[in-house]
């Protein structure tokens, strides 16, 4: 302490120091008694210590949850289908290894809409295919033989259920080999649409399958309307092919295309065009008769000028209509003689993993375990990131508010100490 | 300084790396803290309560206390300052609600700051602001050095010296006025 600060004030300082004031005895007891209060460990802990405690616990919980999830999800190889395997792959690519039994089912749908837009309510219906474990057991619906509405159809929808760790290739191969394929009527004018999803093992297999698909349809007298091929470095590849084959070769085509790899899903839709064709033919006959009448009337010379002009207009209209109807009937015939096949070829990482698993035996389970644990941790990381993004600004605002409050408190302290 | 008898076991716990148990800190500093609070508040009863609260807080934070950053007395005075500021704030709210005329009159005629002080000096101390009494208590009675006192007050060392000089000057003037 510098003595200069008290220079000139020695007298008053000495007087102040001469005074005595000790804390009363009861205050000593009170303070010492207050000190015996049991300590609140968590409250006494500094923020850094709390952080060191909380972070490892949270990390341990996250990793533990991931391991438990992985242990539950990976399961033994002989277990029944898991939840993941119940996902339908229709309209999308399978996300898991193929299932053991496929869970195939055929539903012979009711008659679809006729060409003219009327529903084929009275047309014969295909029997409802019963879902069967070993493939579609329900017979495919026959074509509407002589239904008055003429429009019948089959909507056979094959969904291959997938299951983790199970790949009954025999069942899939049997499916792909066309044993259960829908028969397409060849004795009527029918248009068929088919959608196939086929999984191949690798990039090279994808390329080969794409080329083979073109060759198959060419050999069958058809052609590829469009081909779209995509491949990534990660090993994922996909090809979309729009193919057209003669109707009588459609079944063979579907069978051969399905055999290019592992058939994941198959959808076949047929639409009877007989009624449309008949209506168009009738319309053409009617128009022809009208044209003949108009021509005879014009040649007779009995018409007045105004009637003649009106008849000429009607004749022109009829000729125009018959031209259009003939063109439409030609299109109907062409459509009724061809089948469109939308083929999707894809490589599947899960499929590749399954192949590896089968080769490595029991070690595959450990691989699945690690994969599941990693996936779960990634999800946890995403959730954490999401929370940080959401909570970050709130924390920032809170910190700002805390700083403002602290500054305000300091100002108040000075004011109170100076003016109280 | 009063001897500490029947010391609770909890107070005798010494933090690893620290030679002094908390009970010793209490014994050494309670009187000083009490005097500081009496000077700051001008109220012995309030000072007792605040001293008790100060040591309770200090005990809770004893594990966090770092002796390398300052003496225990400075640390305790800092806590006492914070506690007293809270008290002042509460008092300000209370006095806004109540008429404190009688209380203030009573305080003026009552010797609170120390035993053995002349009445003139006692009255002169009353006339100082709490901030002035505080710096006097820290520098003169508790004999804290300039940096420590400045740290307790939350001001710069220069401001602390200035405040002390003004407080002592004013105290002398007030004593002179009372005598006249």
Image (cartoon, coloured by chain):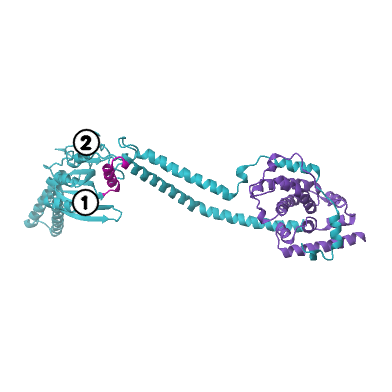
Residue at disc 2, secondary structure: loop
Looking at the rendered image, the disc whose residue lies closer to the viewer, 2 or 1, is 1
Task: State the residue position of label 2.
Answer: A136
- Can residue A153 be seen from the camera position used here? no
Above or below: residue A12 compared with residue A38 = below
Q: Nearer the viewer, residue B47 or B140?
A: B140
Q: For the point 19% across and 51% down, which residue is it?
A: A209
Q: Position of residue A403 (x, y in %)?
A: 61, 56
Location of the N terminus of chain A by quadrant is bottom right
Q: Nearer the viewer, residue A186 or A354?
A: A354
The span shown in magenta is A347-364
Q: Position of residue B160 (x, y in %)?
A: 74, 62
Q: Main secondary structure of the magenta part?
A: helix
Q: For the point 14% across and 41% down, which residue is it?
A: A185
Mark 1 residue crowding within 10 angstroms, few (<14) / some (14–19) / many (20+): some
Q: For the point 61% across and 54% down, which residue is it?
A: A402
* Residue A77 belongs to the span the image colors magenta: no
Q: Nearer the viewer, residue A137 or B140?
A: B140
- Can residue A392 be seen from the camera position used here? yes
Q: Are marks 2 and 1 on the same chain?
A: yes
Q: Nearer the viewer, residue B97 or A54?
A: A54
Return the chain for callout 2: A
Return the chain for callout 1: A
Report which colour depicts chain A.
Answer: cyan
* Residue A353 belongs to the span the image colors magenta: yes
Q: Position of residue B56 (x, y in %)?
A: 70, 45
Report which colour depicts chain B.
Answer: purple
Q: Is residue B178 left or right of residue A178?
A: right
Task: State the residue position of label 1.
Answer: A205
Q: Position of residue A332 (x, y in %)?
A: 15, 49
Above or below: residue A191 compared with residue A406 = above
């Amino acid at each position: 302490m510098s003595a200069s600060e008290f220079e000139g004030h020695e007298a008053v300082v000495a007087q102040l120091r001469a005074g005595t004031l000790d804390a009363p005895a009861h205050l000593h007891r009170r303070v010492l008694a207050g000190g015996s209060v049991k300590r609140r460990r968590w409250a006494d802990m500094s923020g850094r210590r709390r952080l060191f405690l909380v972070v490892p616990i949270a990390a341990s919980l996250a990793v533990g949850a991931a391991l438990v999830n992985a242990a539950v999800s990976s399961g033994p190889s002989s277990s029944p289908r898991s939840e993941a395997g119940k996902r339908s792959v229709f309209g999308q690519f399978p996300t898991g290894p193929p299932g053991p039994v496929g869970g195939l089912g055929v539903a012979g749908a009711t008659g679809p809409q006729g060409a003219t837009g009327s529903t084929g309510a009275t047309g014969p219906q295909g029997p409802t295919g019963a879902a069967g474990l070993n493939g579609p057991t329900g017979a495919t619906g026959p074509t509407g033989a002589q239904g008055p509405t003429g429009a019948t159809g089959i909507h056979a929808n094959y969904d291959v259920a997938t299951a983790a760790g199970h790949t009954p290739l025999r069942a899939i191969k049997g499916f792909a080999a066309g044993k259960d394929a829908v028969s397409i009527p060849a004795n009527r004018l029918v248009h068929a649409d088919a959608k196939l999803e086929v999984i191949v093992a690798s990039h090279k297999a994808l390329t080969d399958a794409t080329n083979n698909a073109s060759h198959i349809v060419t050999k069958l007298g058809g052609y590829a309307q469009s081909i779209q091929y995509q491949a990534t470095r990660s090993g994922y590849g996909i090809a979309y092919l729009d193919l057209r084959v003669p109707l009588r070769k459609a079944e063979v085509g579907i069978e051969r295309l399905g055999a290019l790899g592992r058939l994941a899903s198959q959808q076949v839709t047929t639409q009877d065009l007989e009624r449309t064709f008949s209506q168009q033919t009738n319309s053409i006959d009617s128009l022809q008769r009208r044209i003949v009448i108009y021509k005879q009337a014009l040649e007779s010379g009995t018409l007045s000028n105004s009637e003649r002009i009106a008849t000429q207009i009607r004749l022109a209209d009829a000729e125009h209509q018959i031209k259009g109807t003939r063109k439409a009937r030609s299109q109907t015939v062409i459509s009724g003689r061809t089948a469109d096949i939308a083929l999707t070829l894809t490589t599947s990482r899960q499929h590749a993993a399954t192949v590896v698993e089968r080769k490595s035996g029991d070690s595959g389970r450990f691989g699945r375990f690690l994969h599941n644990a990693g996936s779960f941790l990634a999800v946890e990381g995403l959730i954490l990131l999401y929370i940080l993004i959401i909570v970050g600004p709130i924390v920032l605002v809170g910190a700002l508010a805390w700083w403002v409050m602290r500054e305000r408190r300091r100002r108040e302290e000075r004011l109170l100490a100076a003016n109280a | 300084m009063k001897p500490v008898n029947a010391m609770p076991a909890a107070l005798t716990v010494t933090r690893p790396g620290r030679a002094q148990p908390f009970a010793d800190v209490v014994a050494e500093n309670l009187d000083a803290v009490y005097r500081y609070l009496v000077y700051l508040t001008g109220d012995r009863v309030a000072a007792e309560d605040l001293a008790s609260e100060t040591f309770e807080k200090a005990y809770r934070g004893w594990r966090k206390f770092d002796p390398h950053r300052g003496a225990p007395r400075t640390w305790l005075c800092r806590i006492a300052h914070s506690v007293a500021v809270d008290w002042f704030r509460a008092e300000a709210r209370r006095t806004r609600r109540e008429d404190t005329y009688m209380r203030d009159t009573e305080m003026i005629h009552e010797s609170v700051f120390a035993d053995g002080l002349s009445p003139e000096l006692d009255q002169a101390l009353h006339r100082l602001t709490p901030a002035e009494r505080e710096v006097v208590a820290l520098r003169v009675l508790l004999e804290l050095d300039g940096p420590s006192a400045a740290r307790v007050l939350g001001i710069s060392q220069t401001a602390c010296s200035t405040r002390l000089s003004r407080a002592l000057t004013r105290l002398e003037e007030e004593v002179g006025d009372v005598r006249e």
